[in-house]
Image: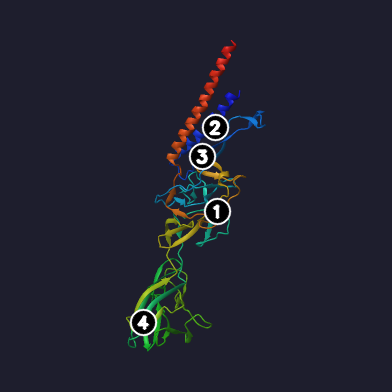
Amino acid sequence: MASFSIPLTGLNADSTALNTIANNLTNMSTTAYKAQTTQFADLFYQQIGSAGSGDPIQVGAGVKVATNETDFSRGPISSTGTDTDVAIDGNGFFVMDSGNGAYEYTRAGNFSLTSTGSLVSANGLNVMGYPAVNGVVNTNAALTGITIPVGQVQQPQATTSFSMTANLNAAATTGTAFPGQATIYDSLGEPHVVTVTYTQTAANTWDYSAALPASDFSAGVSTPITGTLSFDSSGKLTSVTTSGVTSTVGTGAGDVSSIPLSFTGLSDGAADLNLNWNLLGSSNTPTIGQVDATSAVSSTNQDGYAAGQYQTFTIGSDGTVTVTYSNGQEQNVGQLALANISNEQGLKKLGNGDYATSLASGTASIGISGSAGLATLQDGALEGSNVNISQEFSDLIVAQRAFEASSKAVTTFDSVTQETINMIR
């Protein structure tokens, strides 16, 4: 009976619309939830005749749910201040390991850390990214789970080079000595203070003597490393003399840019300290000069550090995960991967804010944020639901009225049927 079946299709379709609206409203506070909208389409038609002009007379069979479209526009981003929270400010999905050899995808960045430091999603899936070796991220490597070295100790690094930016007073008298100091580290992370004593021996000429305190050596004796620095009439360092050999300071063939220093027999049992005293700065200009001004060291730099305890981590706008240690060192431990889906409407919804690709969606294109159409990330923040409550209430009224209309059609036809039966009786 078409008069029954047609409004029943309306009741079924309107029920789906009401369910969709109810699901949207109940997920208004769900992290990165994407609102859905139910769209209808008419069913097939039956031709029951034709008009005098030959136009077909067709009767419809009702309505069906054509699509349940998802609005993948970005929801509002709110700061949380939590290290493990991260929001995608635009296009893209986080990549997660489903555990069965396939990836799942989500917009919800309310991550957390396991006891072993693994970064996981709200339902415990490993968040995937590119690995880092010695602080250098390799975006050509296979994806791996992001792991934070929680509770771990960063091993110390012995100093291999140091520099000293200083001025030696050109007006100083012969025999004037000026000490400059820099802190360096041995292989055990123990700090040592190397003192470079500059002594003027003639105009534009200074001897140097680099040494550690005698107490730093197991033999209790410190043997300085000596040489001579020469300057031109403009106060620029031009040459250095070590072991009786004079070399031009520069980067050309046969030039020197550093002075090798070696300290052996350290009292703490560390490996011998072999390092270079760099004489040139980043622009390849000498860091030690001589002008008529007070002798002073303005800065020192070196590449060693003591052991450090893990403290915290941050996620950069490009997804780079950087760990900070108690020794002040920072190190990259990975970079979050993002996925680009060509047909987002074709994604299969898995619940928990997770999606899986399908034949309709196509395979995911995986890369890093800020490239290939992928958005940047915001650390310490979460994307909220994009449900528009005003629109949902408006749609709710329309769906309610449509359901009531279909219900009225059923009851009306029921009354007509009863009248027909009564006529026969």
Where residue 50 sits, quadrant-wise, is top right
Colour mode of the rendering = rainbow
Category of crowding for the residue at label 1, using alpha-carbon neighbours closer than 10 angstroms: few (below 14), some (14–19), many (at least 20): some
Q: Earlier in the sequence, mark 3 or mark 4?
A: 3
Q: Position of residue 331 (x, y in %)?
A: 46, 61
In the rendered structure, which amino acid carries the disc numbered 4?
Leu
Report whether 200 appears left or right of 315: left
Residue 134, x across and y down, in percent: 51, 62
Amino acid carrying label 1: it is Thr
Query: Residue most toward the top?
Result: 425
How far apart are the alpha carbons under marks 3 and 1? 36 Å
Q: Quadrant of the N terminus?
A: top right
Q: Amino acid at mark 3?
A: Thr
Mark 3 lies on residue: 37
Residue behind mark 4 = 168
Closer mark to the observer between disc 2 and disc 4: 2
Question: What's the CA distance linking mark 2 and mark 1?
Answer: 44 Å
Residue 114 in sight from this viewpoint: no
User: Residue flagged by tag 2: what amino acid is it?
Assistant: Ala
Real-space CA distance between mark 2 and mark 4, rounded to the nearest whole angstrom: 88 Å
284 or 134: nearer the viewer:
284
Q: What distance separates the C-alpha of mark 3 from that of mark 4?
A: 76 Å
For disc 1, the marked residue is: 144
> Vertically, is 391 above or below 207?
above
